[in-house]
Amino acid sequence: MEVLLRFLLIISIYLPYSWEEDCSIRRVGSRLEIDVDANRYCGTRFEQQQQEAEKVSQDERDMLYELGEKFHKFRKDLDDCQSSKEKLKRLYEEERRKSEKQNEKIEKLESLIEKLMEKNDEQKKQLREQEEKLKAARTLLQTSMDFNEELKRNHSYLEDEFENCTDDFRAVARQNKVLKQEVRKWMRLAKILRKQLAVVLPTLNRCRNCKFSNPGGKFMPIDGITK
């Protein structure tokens, strides 16, 4: 900026007058009127200024050249800055678009997280229900195990009772066998009695009106039977 100010200062030294002042340019409405004599003087003044400029020392020319080079460099740097500014603007737009896309992704992720949280709450609710069912199942299992233990004890008791009943049954079977033997014995005896009655009954029928006592008061034997 300091170099530019120095350049403008030098230009103001060598060009002290403006064309509008030296050449008497006047504005009339929308037109510009130029005084011919003033214009001729203007040309002469310009030639004088050109001659004076040719008398400038070589150092000043070098300085002007250096200032021009610096000005061109400054202009180039300014153009580079403008180009960099455009690049930064494009980068900013790209980053802004990326940021918008990221914001959209973040919103989608937040929505997904909310859905997952709702699903997690539902799963927690289902888990609590499953835990309650599991507790009920454990209680039922414990009751079943207790009932099974009771059944085992009852089964053992019943086995003992069955053994006792088996022993009783065997004793009864033995008694039944003895009774059967007794029955067979009495049946044989009854058979013998029926045979004897078959012999005695006709005689008893003939002697129905007779007395069965002898004069001595003793019973008379009839076919081996004593009455």
Image (tube, rainbow, N blue to C red):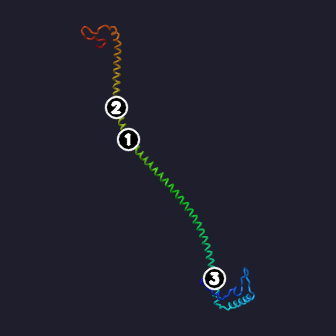
Residue at 25% across / 7% down in the picture?
215
Q: CA distance from mark 3 to mark 2?
A: 135 Å
Question: Disc 3 designates what residue?
Answer: 71
Badge 2 density bin: few <14, some 14–19, many ≥20, Cα 10 Å: few
Image coordinates for residue 62, horizontal then vertical, percent: 64, 88
Image coordinates for residue 112, horizontal then vertical, percent: 54, 58
Q: What is the three-letter code of the residue carrying label 3?
A: Phe
Badge 1 density bin: few <14, some 14–19, many ≥20, Cα 10 Å: few
Left-right relation of 221 to 94 = left
Along the viewing direction, whichever of 45 and 88 lies nearer the viewer: 45
Q: CA distance from mark 1 to mark 2?
A: 26 Å
Left-right relation of 82 to 209 = right
Residue 172 vertical position relative to residue 212 in the rendered view, above or below: below
Q: What is the three-letter code of the residue carrying label 1?
A: Glu
Question: Disc 1 designates what residue?
Answer: 150
Comes first in the chain, label 1 or label 2: 1
Residue at 30% across / 11% down in the picture?
222
> Tag 2, which secondary structure?
helix
